[in-house]
Amino acid sequence: MKWKALALVLLLLLPASALGYPLQSSNGVVNCTIFGTFKDSGFGGYSSSDSNSVLVVDASLGRINQSDNSPIEAAYTLTDGNDRIYKTRSEYIKELQNGRQLIGFVVPRETIAKSLTIDLSQDSSGGEQFIQRFPDLVNLSNDNVTILYYGILRSSIASQKKTVELDVAITNNGTDRMQLDAGNFTLKDQWGWVYQSKEYDSSTRKGIKSMVLEPNATIRSALAFVSLSPQSRPVELVYRYSDQISMTLNIDTEAGLGSQDKCLDSKQAEETDSSLAGSIKATKARLAKVKKFNSSEEDEEAKGHDEL
C-alpha cells in the first residue's frame, strides 16, 4: 500500500540527534535511558561557587521483566573526560515519576561527562553494573577557529519570554588576533527563527564579553539569547567568522526523542554509534521493524479488522 511505502521512506529518513539523545543501554536485566544533561548551580540546595557546579543527568531505569514492578535500587557515579570519578548523594537525586530521575553530581565547572555507571549491587535482581557512555561534544573546526558546544547552561521563562544560555568554547586557530563579540553568534529554533546573542550585561552577568582572542588562545563563555518564545527549542548555533564565512552547529538534543528502538547493551550501542557497519545495522533494523509492522497489519486485515 502507498501509505506503507511512505512510512518506510519516512522511517529511513528520520534525522539522528546531533548529541545522540536519548542514550540507551542495558545489562540484560535493567534498561537505562538518558534523555539529556544540564548544569544547575542551585540543584539540591547546592551553594554555587566560582569553581564548581552541579551536572544533572535526566535518566530513567526500567526492568526488562515488566511484571516486576519493584523499585530499582541503584547507585550512580559519573566519570569525566580525565577519568575522574564523582559520586552523587541522596539530596542530589530527584524523583520525577516512577523510574524517572534527575541525578546531580557536584563537579568542576569545566567538566565534560564521559560516562555514567549504574551500580545495582544493592538490588537482588538488578544484575551486574553497567556503563552508559555520553556522546562526544558537538564541535566544528577550520583553519580559523574551533567551536566546542558543551550544552545548555540554563533556560528560564519570565513574562512569557524564554532566555537560553549556552556554554561554548572558542579557539583562535589562525596566526592573527581575532575580534570576538556577541555579534558573531546567532541561534535558530526549530522553525528557523533567528535570535541574536546578547552582549554581556554586568548587572545580570549574562552574555559574552567583547574581546580580542590571541592566536592559539581559547575562551570559554556563556552565550545568552533572550526573547525566545516559550515554545522555541534551540536547534542550530551559528558562528559568523566574517561576512562571507559562517559555521553551523546542530545542537538539537530532542531530534531523536521520538525513537522507540529497544535498548542496546553498552558494547552494541558504541558499535552502532561509531562505525559505518553500525549505521548499516541500524538501517537494516529499521527496515526489519517496518517489515514486521507491515506484516502484522496484513495479518489484521486478513482477520477482518477495520482499517482506520
Image (cartoon, helix red, strand yellow):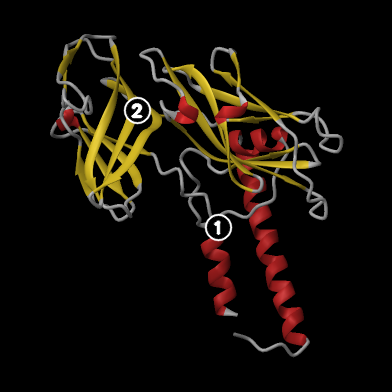
| Crowd tier of the residue under label 2, counting other residues whose Cα lies within 10 Å: few below 14, some 14–19, many 20 or above | some
**Marks 1 and 2, how far apart at CA:** 32 Å
Callout 2 amino acid:
Asp
Q: What residue is shown at x 53% (from left), y 71% (from top)? A: 6
User: x%, y% of residue 61?
Assistant: 68, 42
Q: Tell me: 52 left or right of 161.
A: right
Instruction: Say which quarter of the image contains residue 120.
Output: top right
Figure quadrant of the N terminus: bottom right
> Helix or strand or loop: what does disc 2 sit on?
strand
User: x%, y% of residue 180?
Assistant: 17, 22
Q: Tell me: 292 left or right of 282.
A: right
| Crowd tier of the residue under label 1, counting other residues whose Cα lies within 10 Å: few below 14, some 14–19, many 20 or above | some
Q: What residue is shown at x 54% (from left), y 55% (from top)? A: 258
Instruction: Say which quarter of the image contains residue 73.
Output: top right
Q: What residue is shown at x 46% (from left), y 23% (from top)? A: 46
Q: Residue furthest right?
A: 124
User: x%, y% of residue 235?
Assistant: 35, 45
Q: Decide which of 114, 107 is in the foreground and name it.
A: 107
Callout 1 amino acid:
Leu
Residue tagged 2:
167
Residue tagged 1:
12
User: x%, y% of residue 60?
Assistant: 63, 43
